[in-house]
Image: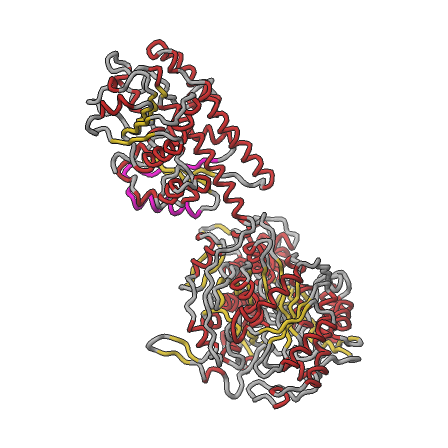
Amino acid sequence: MSTRLPLLLRPLRRPPVAPPCRLGAPCRALGSGGSGPEGLFRQRRLQDDQAGSSRGRSSRAHPARTAIVREVIQNSKEVLSLLQEKNPAFKPILTIIQTGDDNLMQETNQDLAAEVGLSITHICLTPDSGEDEIIDEILKVNEDMRVHGLALQISENTFSNKVLNALKPEKDVDGVTDVNLGKLVRGDAHECFVSPVARAVIELLEKSDINLNGKKIMVIGAHGSLEATVQCLFQRKGSLTMSCPWGTPQLQSKLLEADVVVLGSPKPEDIPLSWIQPGTTVLNCSHDFLTGKLEGGSDRVPSRGLLVEDDVSLLSAALRIQNVVNSGRRWLREQQYTRWRLHCLKLQPLSPVPSDIEISRGQTPKAVDVLAKEIGLLADEIEIYGKSKAKVLLSVLERLKDQADGKYVLVAGITPTPLGEGKSTVTIGLVQALTAHLNVNSFACLRQPSQGPTFGVKGGAAGGGYAQVIPMEEFNLHLTGDIHAITAANNLLAAAIDTRILHENTQTDKALYNRLVPLVNGVRAFSEIQLARLKKLGILKTDPSTLTEEEMSRFSRLNIDPSTITWQRVLDTNDRFLRKITIGQANTEKGFSRQAQFDIAVASEIMAVLALTHSLMDMKERLGRMVVASDKNGQPVTAEDLGVTGALTVLMKDAIKPNLMQTLEGTPVFVHAGPFANIAHGNSSVLADKIALKLVGEEGFVVTEAGFGADIGMEKFFNIKCRASGLVPNVVVLVATVRALKMHGGGPSVTAGVPLKKEYTEENIQLVADGCCNLQKQIQIAQLFGVPVVVALNVFKTDTRAEIDLVCELAKRAGAFDAVPCYHWSVGGKGSVDLARAVREAANKRSRFQFLYDVQLPIVEKIRTIAQAVYGAKDIELSPEAQSKVDRYTQQGFGNLPICMAKTHLSLSHEPNKKGVPRGFILPISDVRASIGAGFIYPLVGTMSTMPGLPTRPCFYDIDLDTETEQVQGLF
């Protein structure tokens, strides 16, 4: 392996003693040579003239050979310019990893790169760097998406196959990896990188008017990839090629027979140059060939056939630059829409269908890093949690910013029974059908479930049957800790509120100020967030000692009115006894107690902020804007005023990254954010949708769901989430079940945990027909926003063909683009192929999306618009408290925010027992609250619990752990 250095790098190394031939000194050292190829050519002509008397005129740079370098550089420059016209920020980078301080390769490449317009970075390691250190650097560069070419300039003893094949073939611009060599040998040169040195050898010979067909070629002293590539290229030209080491027996006689000799490594001193036949074309790839004895008379090579090494080195450097540009072009092409080469997981559905957790456990998920690679994520764009979950970094949005978005599909539903109608199951079945069965890129984006209902009455929320996210226990329990981060951040802010009230009530202005701006090493200094508060107050000072007493008081005192505090503590557990509590009863709190409450963690405004933010900076700003109370003058008090914004952002810095998982069939899923669907907007995160839309590409699909019925979740998705994201939906999939339609048609009440009455398990065409009024109303609601509707009838085993056909027929009559029965629960994606085809067809229709109302309308008018147009109410009625809140928020400047109605999901009206399509009712607004950080006003229709309780028999009775296998049991 010690002789492998010449295969690429030695041709560009400076010889120990400058020879009297054309070996170019670094062009940057020339005072008048200039940079780029012209400077190098002028330098070479000067050296030719100096060497001409001893070497003859024939050894000067051949005009055709200098022209080819100019041609390569000009071509590369033009290609890069064209690429940058469409991608202005694109600038390829060649990274060179080298050991030692040899800089000839650096300077030659730097000049040519500058001429073309790309960049070069050097990673300089110590001369004694070992194989592992070099490979570590290679692996880092492999994953740097900014780098499009990687070359090595390292010592002979580290130039091993292990090192060479650590390079990514697509960045191997010197063509030294086995992958690139294999493609060349198979005849796929257009799909690989070919050694620039070998290409330079061939092109220089051809530009010297040497016909290679039938010529006898002797390649001496070449090794590894250079030897293989040179032989392959000569053979393609019809040459008879023989390769041998310097110590080959009868070398002299073989040299005498050669028409062309290619020298791949330094000539041993005991082999005279006179062995080379006069008139033979000699092409040298080794610097040392031109030292010492070339000047001597007896050993001189007959010079009329000599092509010296700097012809090879300069052209090979130019070809390397060309390879970098071509690598960048390929990379840009790959960023455009391509169908994923996704290895989908096979299903073997059983009948009867086993429990959800048995199905989940029966499928082995792909390693999440494999899934990430399949869908186009880079290794440095994911953070792996265990084997089957990963966080996806937001940097992917910057990398794919010029990528066209895919189609955007929302899954909503009719007014559900308390059992739910399977929106999550339909969402997963649809993407399984699109990707695993129709070979279309698709992504599901789901909300993260709260653990409270998981242990309470609802159980798991990963879909069901053969349309699930797996592993379902990891989906339902903890995931990557996002909800815990929200809990910590929320409760830190709650603690800050009460603590601030306590300290303001027990300290003088001066004492309070001195503690807020303490002496540190004898100096007082404001923190960044304190400087921001000063600016908000109009105090344009930065020196704490210069504030007046009045300014110190204004700065130090928030004067929070405890009766106006809206920020509650949260917990991700259903606990009815925390719905109303008294805090501050310990003696240490000095009698400052007040009534408070706990909400479920997903009801926190921080969850809504997470779901609506579009960047880390945006999240920080939204967290700072959250209003927690009013002061005694009626002005809002924010998290920023409390000085806690930065700390909240630190707690949330990982939670902002979407979580990557997979379906039972191995298709990708983002699970991110899970805001309450009643007091918040009930949709997964904007960021997950945006990243997914880039990853699927222009012809792909992103399918996300909205909580509860279309009157709640879909309306909020359009009016709140789409305003925040700027994304335009292409299709609404409206989920219905025969069971729910029978309920709306007058069937008996449905109660969770109680067996269904016979009306729901036996055919009843009349109940179905009467109940389709709710389906028709929900289709009309979707049409208000100008988006085509496809109805997905989630089929249960008790549904009859007559009932299914009736629903589909009535749905189409009501204006649905199509209506399709779905069987994904029992057979997986195969059971939703018809739905997938209908969605693809509907997505090709032009979306005429529009918002329901202008946010500049008064708050009351926006509420009225939703109540009348969506719910079908006659009018609204505000309580005195609600009207007072509307007036306050309007006065505080929050009147232009969208509306997030907090209403029961079990009816279009405010009364859960009114099914079908209630009419002529007055919608009562009992209270109005604000989530200023999230960016919406939420009116409360009747009472709205934000902390669920546990039932008589909670789900936790069935949940257990097998202590031997560590498998979770009982999660459905």
Q: Nearer the viewer, residue 759 or 653?
A: 759
Q: Is residue 739 visible?
A: yes
Q: Residue at x 25, y 11 (%)?
A: 297
Asked whether residue 125 is drawn in magenta, I would say: yes
How many numbered badges does the structure rendering display? 0
Q: Residue at x 20, y 26 (%)?
A: 250
Give the quadrant of the N terminus: top left
Judge from the rendering whether residue 959 lies leftward or rightward of residue 292; answer left or right.
right
Which residue is outermost to the front?
214
Q: Residue at x 39, y 37 (%)?
A: 174
The picture quadrant where one finds residue 551 is: bottom right
Q: Nearer the viewer, residue 76 or 894?
A: 76
Q: Nearer the viewer, residue 191 or 626?
A: 191
Q: Residue at x 34, y 42 (%)?
A: 164
Residue 232 percent coordinates (x, y):
36, 35
Residue 695 percent coordinates (x, y):
54, 55
Colouring mode (rainbow / by chain / secondary structure / one colour): secondary structure
The picture quadrant where one finds residue 578 is: bottom right
Residue 597 percent coordinates (x, y):
57, 77
Asked whether residue 823 is drawn in magenta, I would say: no
Which residue is outermost to the bottom?
758
Q: Is residue 514 above or below residue 715?
A: above
Q: Is residue 647 visible?
A: no
Q: Where does the magenta region start and end?
A: 119-143
Q: Is residue 16 above or below residue 629?
A: above
Q: Nearer the viewer, residue 817 or 133?
A: 817
Judge from the rendering whether residue 578 lies leftward or rightward of residue 911; answer left or right.
left
Which residue is outermost to the top?
53
Q: Is residue 777 above or below residue 558?
A: below
Q: Is residue 641 above or below residue 229?
A: below
Residue 948 percent coordinates (x, y):
57, 79
